[in-house]
Image (cartoon, rainbow, N blue to C red):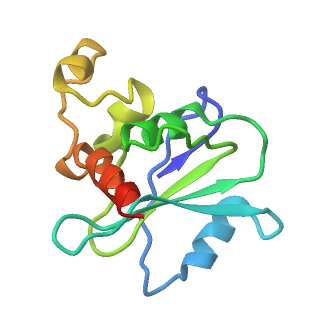
Amino acid sequence: VLVPCSDSKDLQEKYFDNDAQSEEEIVEEFFGAESIVKLTLLLRPSAERTPGIYVYSSSIPTPNIRATRLAMSCGLLSLRFKGDVLLFRHFSESLSISNIHGALTLSPDLRETIQSKMGNNQPSPFWLRGACQQNYHDNIAR
């Protein structure tokens, strides 16, 4: 999912064949060959629960409020993204806009009562609701 830093631009959903394109080629396609791109782990992969969520962000200094909101919903409250952001998931399960729409555009608070008051009637997926707890436990273990 490509999350532009401008709220006036729509989110874009792209699917890639990992066998046909390398991760580096995908990142270069979105950001260009000359861009400085930072890789951030938003959600660690776990064998029993979910594939990981990785974030590629550009070096543009414009704040990306939507991507920052998603990081907050994952319990990473001090993480701030700037520039356009590419959310990337490994393994077979795809990442879709509908899975993360509420956290990106409405509120980092994923409680169903809050999300429904904000206009999102679709509950957040299990892996996203558990991301905050998983990241909390990962930080304690360090």
Question: In the rendered view, does 7 fall on the left or right side of 142?
Answer: right
- The vertical placement of 54 against 110, above or below, is below
Q: Give the x, y percent position of residue 38.
A: 67, 61
Q: Give the x, y percent position of residue 4.
A: 61, 41
Residue drawn at point x = 43 percent, y = 28 percent: 105
Residue drawn at point x = 40 percent, y = 56 percent: 139
In the orientation shown, which residue stands out farthest toward the right? 34
- The vertical placement of 40 against 112, above or below, is below
The image quadrant where one finds the C terminus is: bottom left
Q: How many labels does the image show?
A: 0
Image quadrant assignment for residue 8: top right
Q: Give the x, y percent position of residue 83.
A: 69, 44
Question: In the rendered view, does 46 fall on the left or right side of 44?
Answer: left
Closer to the camera in the image, 132 or 64:
132
Image quadrant assignment for residue 125: top left
Question: In the rendered view, does 36 fall on the left or right side of 100?
Answer: right
Residue drawn at point x = 26 percent, y = 70 percent: 46
Residue drawn at point x = 78 percent, y = 40 percent: 61
- The vertical placement of 135 against 22, above or below, is above
Question: In the rendered view, does 136 fall on the left or right side of 4?
Answer: left
In the orientation shown, which residue stands out farthest toward the top? 117
Q: Give the x, y percent position of residue 1.
A: 46, 52
In the orientation shown, which residue stands out farthest toward the bottom? 19
